[in-house]
Amino acid sequence: MSKKFGLGRGLGSLIPSADDHDFTPGIEMSDNLNLDQDQTTDHKVIYVDPYNISTSHFQPRQLFEHSSLEELVNSIKQHGILEPLIASPLEGGKYKLIAGERRLRAAKILNLEKVPVIVREVSEQQRLEISLIENIQRQNLNPLEEAQAYRKLIDEFGLTQAEVADKVGKSRAKIANSLRLLSLPEEIKKMIINGRLSESHAKVILELDSEAEQLKLARSVVQRTLSVRDTEQLVQSKRKRKVNAVDDSLKRISQELSQALQTKVTIRPKRQGGVIQIEYYNEEDLLSLRRRLKG
């Protein structure tokens, strides 16, 4: 049986993409796999006891849906593992998993004696990058897992948002927006993880300033099953009311100052602070204002 197991665009510089191979359990195979335009390295596809493969703490995916895993188990039971796992060698015939944790879990459920593995020497940073890209391309991560993986690349390996974007094939704006999700209250994060709140809803909720407002809106969205558009309209309405309240407050204060100083007072708010303008009409008005202000 001849199978091609490409790993998707964007992984080429990190994971070797194999040509067609015949997979027969117990047989070790070698192939020259292209890493980049200037360099090729021999990579072996071998068969390994799944219990000799340990998982990595850099695995970005934390939740594995039972139904999805069950489907994979049934598929492997009928067709075998069509795409090898990727792992790096350890001492004593052991391996550290780089990519393919769902396949490894399924293999253990089925009590398979051997699983196909591409052996690859990688750094810890590459391990996280590969796991992240593989999961993103298969859409296996929830928005919080994806954001946490981006944060790891930035915090643990000193990458900038632009560098992360380049490595995972996303825009810098996408990375920035994803990282913003990590600032949400824990209750809202749980709503996203369990699928009750979408990433699009969360981005709209982030436009509110206070956690109390964010929580109130998130609960309302879930309880009333509001669409993203409905959520946007609620946020716009809240902003409008807030602006109107500020305008009314400033208008009242300017009137009070005008009465106290017996001249026209205008207040112009800015993003931070603002300007108070006090008018006078002649030198006598100015001296009178000075007396009142010193008052």
Image (cartoon, rainbow, N blue to C red):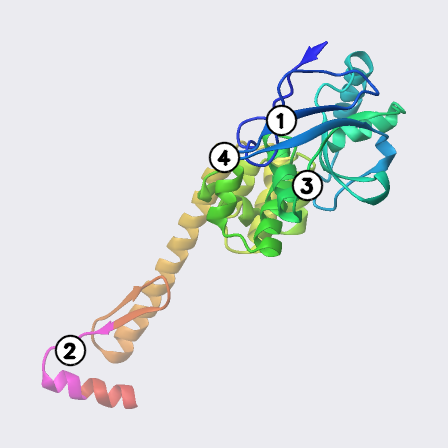
The amino acid marked with disc number 1 is: Asn
Q: Position of residue 288 (x, y in %)?
A: 19, 87
Which is nearer the eye, 80 or 172?
A: 80
Per the image, the residue denoted by label 2 is 280
Task: Reply above or below: 209 against 25.
Answer: below
Quick one: label 3 or label 2, which is nearer the N terminus?
A: 3
Q: Is residue 282 magenta?
A: yes
* Separation of residues labelled 2 and 1 (CA atoms): 85 Å
Per the image, the residue denoted by label 4 is 38
The amino acid marked with disc number 4 is: Asp
* Separation of residues labelled 3 and 2 (CA atoms): 78 Å
The amino acid marked with disc number 3 is: Glu
Per the image, the residue denoted by label 3 is 121
- Residue 65 in sight in this render: no
Quick one: label 3 or label 1, which is nearer the N terminus?
A: 1
Per the image, the residue denoted by label 1 is 32
What are the residue bounds of the magenta stretch? Answer: 277-287
Which is nearer the eye, 65 or 159?
A: 159
Judge left or right: residue 253 versus residue 104: left
* Quarter in which the N terminus is drawn: top right
* Separation of residues labelled 4 and 1 (CA atoms): 13 Å
Task: Reply above or below: 197 against 150.
Answer: above
